[in-house]
Amino acid sequence: MKGFAGKILRINLTKKEIKTEPLKEEMARKYLGGVGFGARILYEEVPAKADPLGPDNKLIITPGILVATGLPTMSKTALNFKSPLTGGYGRSVVGAYLGEELKKAGYDAIIIEGKSENPVYILIEDSKVEIKDASGLWGMLTSEAHKKLQEMHGKVRTGIIGPAGEKLSKISEVDFEERQAARAGVGAVMGSKKLKAIAVKGSGEVEYHDKQMLKELILKWGKILKEHPATEADMKYGSGEFYEWVNRERGTFPSLNWRYGYMPVYDQLKEGEKSHLDPYYWSPKYTVKNRPCPHCTKPCGRYIKISDGKYAGTEVEGVEYEVLYSLGGVLGIDDIGAVAKMNKLCDDYGLDAISAGVTLAWAMDCYENGLLTKEDTDGLDLKFGNDEAAVKAIEKMGKKEGKLGELLFNGSKEAAEKLGKDSWKYAVHIKGLELPAYDIRGLKGVALAFAVSTRGGCHLTGGAYGIELTGAWWKMKGIDRTKGEWKGFEIKTLEDLMTLYDAIGACKFSRHMFFIEAFPEMMKAITGWDMGEEELWVAGERIYNITKMFNVREGFSRKDDHLPWKVQNVPIPKGPSKGLFVSQDEFDRMLDEYYIARGWSREGIPTKAKLSQLGLKDLAEEPFAAGI
Amino acid sequence: MKGFAGKILRINLTKKEIKTEPLKEEMARKYLGGVGFGARILYEEVPAKADPLGPDNKLIITPGILVATGLPTMSKTALNFKSPLTGGYGRSVVGAYLGEELKKAGYDAIIIEGKSENPVYILIEDSKVEIKDASGLWGMLTSEAHKKLQEMHGKVRTGIIGPAGEKLSKISEVDFEERQAARAGVGAVMGSKKLKAIAVKGSGEVEYHDKQMLKELILKWGKILKEHPATEADMKYGSGEFYEWVNRERGTFPSLNWRYGYMPVYDQLKEGEKSHLDPYYWSPKYTVKNRPCPHCTKPCGRYIKISDGKYAGTEVEGVEYEVLYSLGGVLGIDDIGAVAKMNKLCDDYGLDAISAGVTLAWAMDCYENGLLTKEDTDGLDLKFGNDEAAVKAIEKMGKKEGKLGELLFNGSKEAAEKLGKDSWKYAVHIKGLELPAYDIRGLKGVALAFAVSTRGGCHLTGGAYGIELTGAWWKMKGIDRTKGEWKGFEIKTLEDLMTLYDAIGACKFSRHMFFIEAFPEMMKAITGWDMGEEELWVAGERIYNITKMFNVREGFSRKDDHLPWKVQNVPIPKGPSKGLFVSQDEFDRMLDEYYIARGWSREGIPTKAKLSQLGLKDLAEEPFAAGI
């Protein structure tokens, strides 16, 4: 089968068994790769109610189908697992060199199952696959372990957990050479298997259907991306380029644990001054170099070094837009040095920087509201804006150190459950996953997208922030972010498309350039298949419905598609989105419309009819699929 | 291209030009045949605002893709046109021998365009195609003309209009050897082109991908159909088999112009007695023989002869369930002899038996309510139940004779507009098309399906009566016919499936046997294509959206998806559905849910996003497609 390595690598850590299995053509055509393979295998192989941190959970690593083709931005590799954070479907996608290496080594997917007794790492050098002792790596920061692995094995590409993952933090991540598969507790899944790292070197080549056509497409799309009007600013300022606009023009940048819809500093700034989190302020000052994902012709990633102030000397890849929020704005900190420092700590200790920051914001809110005292914080004065306390707190989380480290180690939901009282009202999560950097009180479609996302509160499942912030995208116009009505089909469409991106391996930051139009010709060049856009849409929808069915099998239903308390009960107090929030009536209608657009039941369960229409006959037979 | 004749025959009656054009592979795969070809060609070739009775309208005749394969029930041939009755998309599908003959003659479609000055007929004998003088046929009843054509040309298969079509009745039909393409005024389209008949003889063979597989499938599905538990009753009693059940158990048989939900005679019948419209009463008594559509292994059609009473001697193919209503129940007539007589008159004069009967029911209602007097009725005493007056009235309609014939000739909508006053309240139509035999006050999902059907009030567009009457069908369960909520996805699904049936050429009375499962293997044997069910679903949805866009281009929107006044204002007065009706609030919610399920706008306009998802990029670019 052209375009595929043709093999799945299965590694059982309990039995220390390594084998390969052929990739079937039907599987390839229906699920493409990436989250497509991941969702399908996960559904088939991880039984209902499996302990996410037990040997029955699996970690399935799947590069997108277009990874390792040289096509621009195609580097996204999915980690698929049952989430210890949400108890449901888990995926975490990363722009990683490891994915490309995997395909070159001859594998379309790795399934890691079972559980080792002692720390191990997996070394893959083409067909040579070994489970190796990692006792020398255990306890290391991710950057140290990466260095060590390259010292031992040459230029291997790695995915590594830090101390947080080792200690099973439910908000721990996997680090891929300073890019992270961060969300939903994937680090703990590796940690629970005592798997410190995966290191891959591949020297083979995947066979493609039409190399000449591929070459032309690489040039064509590389040029389109490079010359797109948005690219220059993306390259100069990165994903935070629109930071000021989201704050000032939309008022949808949730600051101080969602107290405000923009950074309070904007009330004081004079003409021409910038918030210190604004890349227009810090990127020219601190950027050392661009740091692209593989094959990107519009690289938004950068490597920075803080050269002044009390965090001088801090180096990190970033800082991404999300982190400007999670380790900056939501903590009330307008200091890029502090943010960079915490970012580096998260990467090194292997903590999801979004979840870690939003969990800390919860603690600050509790502290300011008297629900936490210095006794609970190991003496830290956890006021909003106290950057030094925040830096120390993040380090404690990474190490699971002290009372505070213990409390925050597994994210805001569990912390609030432990602390009790009204503290749950300050926990800004959905299904356990902490929310990203969009104040969904003022972005109603995004509120819906966050609420229904199968992995929990996530901006990437639907990617709806783009269309809601701007009001128009792709074939849709006149989107009113302040109203909840008539969003069902919009969000369904976006989810199906973003799922397709995660199956293909494309960068979602290029979705306004690729849309879906790019993919049929790319698929043709790679596989030889004639896949019209309509087949790709159905593939996206098919995969998404599997992730939903995974959750339904775990007992999820309408009740789990919820919003955080603040979003429903505390209107945005000032700014361009003043007064906005999501009432229960409005939200109920939004859910209804979304489920209807999806062909799901009133309880949010995929119907047998819809599953059949997607070619998921086996799932349609599941007793828990809805009759109507 | 296997499975296709590969040619489209284009006949211009203005220029007397005949040519053939190749069928393109993309067209074949995306649209299959039948209404698929029809909708696409219609959309492309009949300009917006074209006069349905002018030369710009076209009549496109398209056998389903599986017609002429020998596969059971595959005989359905679509007539596609702009409807003079609704002003929108028109289709009329018929189980015709002519369709099979056409494919054997080497054509997948005929496009008839322009307008002849003098009466003509088209004679097709394989590659020999002629436009011939029809002055000798003009004015003839359909049965006479058919006889004459066979006398002249041997065993040609025919489609013929009667005097009603010649005189441009907007409720006139085309007769195919006692099967009718009846609805939406297709007879007048032929009449406007001065085209009396089409006669076809084909001696070729279509090439199929896998003849052995085809043979096996013919046997396999023939057996499944034959042995299905419903088949015996269907063969004995025909489509009216469930007549008593619909009356007594559901109370959803609209009688006396929708005054009641069942035939009043049931209030008088003693134990064991039957309504005289019930096939259990009349079929054993009068059936001469079964009269199947081509290749049917579960033939429900019959030829009857009334052997007693005042209509003794009447012979007709029928009487179908719909006609038991339209020429029986809705007129308050419980006499199969009278119904058979009127049925024969409709067939001979070429009137749509549903529309003709329901239009007459409107006149009776007006008469009983004093809006029409004997002066208007040419002296007829048009009380409900007066069978002799009804028979005379139908004949007058067929001939456009007298004041009454003139008034009723173009259907109930136009008649009510002419008569004025409150008479529109008694007109039971949607978009101009008279309603079929299901009291949609007690079948809420069917109400929605009728309201939104792109060809107007129609039971076949969604075929929802089966699921709503029984509460479960295919993958759907727990359907509550008394509630309007949560029907959007159900109706969308059914419409897409029924559209697929009309593209394939399958009998909708077999939908509980074929579902969709039958078609992938059939398509494989015929064409060699691997078409999963999901591709077929998308094809159905794609075609349906074109029919909608045809209407939108004509100015249709939410306002045109309406219900008859009685359905919204007069609850069913007694019986199992007592008290049921459809309020405006309920209906608004139903429309919202349906549009959302379809990915259309609040105004009921297909969105550019949905059209793109269906591979209809050109339609997505139309300025009148919805942004969101």
Image: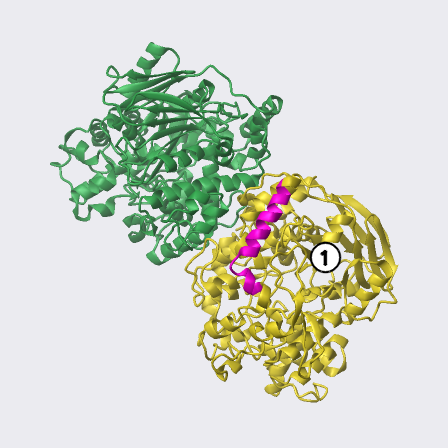
Chain colours: A green, B yellow
- Which residue is painted at 42% across and 44% down in the image? A619
- Looking at the rendered structure, the kind of residue marked 1 is Tyr
Location of residue B201 with respect to A348 vertically, above or below: below
Secondary structure found at label 1: helix
The residue drawn where x is 58% and y is 50% is B221
Taking depth in this image into account, of B402 and B82 the one nearest to the observer is B402
Q: Quadrant of residue B353?
A: bottom right
- Image-based side of B296 in relation to A32, left or right: right
Image quadrant where residue A120 sits: top left
Relative to B105, residue B57 above or below? below
Whether B295 is among the magenta residues is: no
Give the side of residue B317 with respect to residue A537, left or right.
right
Image x and y of residue A161, in percent: 29, 24
The image position of residue B512, as x and y in percent, is: 52, 56
Residue lying furthest left = A375
Q: Height in image: A314 above or below B521?
A: above
For label 1, the residue is B97
